[in-house]
Amino acid sequence: MLPADVAAFSDGLKAAFPAIRFVSLDYWQHFVDQPRWEADCIESRRREKLGLPEIELRRHMRDPTGESLHYWDSLADPAETRFYVWIEPPGWRPVWGPEDDYGLRYIETIPRLRFEFRRCHFQLGWPRGSWDDVEPMPTSGRHTLVLQGYQFLVRWNPREPEAEAFGKKVYNILRKLTACEFKVFEPDSRRAYDDKTWRMQKQCLAGRHALAWSLMRRHNYLKCDNWANLLKSADYRFRTGDVFTKAESRKFFADAEKRFQEDLRLHMEAYERFRGQPRGDIEFESRGDRLVAARLYKPSAATSTTESGAASRVALELRVRRRNGRAQWS
């Protein structure tokens, strides 16, 4: 969703729920001594460079009891991107818990009628590139610009009719401002799998302004969190070469299946190689879509007090080598 979509969503929520409130997901930040925290961070970095003992970093949060929370007028406010959205019960006052190890206190009585919302951000360049909350300017027509959506999370217990009604009403407000039909593109080649329109109501929703934005440039794409493919509005008209031919599609999926089976085989062989070693954490490293290394770490209790860094905890490392076109561990 672009800011205009988010502003419309905020207006719809306020019209439906006059008591609705927009609160930072990190609502405790309003009560933190920021200058003191920043000074402690600078001192910590200085001591680290000089090899001096570390200092304990705490947030220096004042007692918020009796103080009002900081509310935002809209989910589109540029100063914040991560929100709780809730309805405060009549006479509600926050009850704060004790400090944690970092000096933070959290509200123990968060209102039941609530959901989480995180705004989108932009990435210039794919698959690697810088992320920004503000739309960057591509320097050429071939630069890929991705608008990635993050999170709209509303939960309820079916045994709580009021919470269920709230969640469904919020979702219906959002659905009226969004669409769930897209053209779907393979992320590496930026070519569509087929010329069909994919309906993705359970995976992705996109605001009307975001859909229009995806049509402004050939390489403007939408992306949902935890969904690998790139998307465009269902109204996008394909150009010559935009879509895989049937032969290219068959080859693409055959190659993908071959890579998957090879990756699965390498994982199983690595676990077999680690079987006789002391039990510990296992980490696999990939570059792009290829597996390149596997590491077995020593159990934490077995690590010497003089050892430092992850490298000192590696009990066994395997590297992938290719011989006669076949990947093997060495």
Image (cartoon, rainbow, N blue to C red):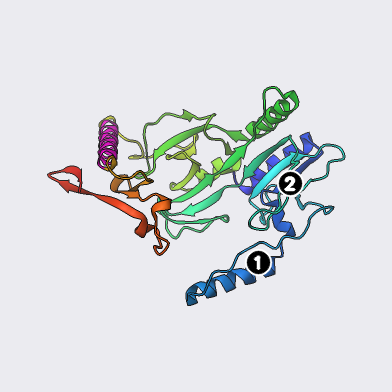
Left or right of 211 on screen, residue 291: left
Residue 34 position by quadrant: bottom right
| Residue found 65% across the figure and 44% down from its top | 6
Left or right of 149 on screen, residue 106: right
For the image, the number of numbered tags is 2
Look at the picture and state if 50 lies above or below 217.
Answer: below
Q: Position of residue 112 (x, y in %)?
A: 73, 35
Residue furthest bottom in the image: 50
Residue furthest right in the image: 91
Look at the picture and state if 219 lies above or below 36.
Answer: above
Magenta segment boundaries in residue numbering = 248-273
Q: Is residue 104 visible?
A: yes
Q: Residues within 10 Å of mark 2 (few under 14, many from 20)?
A: some
**Amino acid type, residue under disc 2 in the picture:** Ile
User: Which is more toward the observer, 253 or 235?
Assistant: 253
Q: Is residue 133 magenta?
A: no
Left or right of 239 on screen, residue 252: left
Q: Position of residue 32 (x, y in %)?
A: 71, 61
Q: Residues within 10 Å of mark 1 (few under 14, many from 20)?
A: some
* SS for dot 1: helix
Reading the image, the residue beneath label 1 is: 37
Classify the position of the N terminus by image quarter. top right
Reading the image, the residue beneath label 2 is: 107
Left or right of 11 on screen, residue 299: left
| Residue found 68% across the figure and 55% down from its top | 104
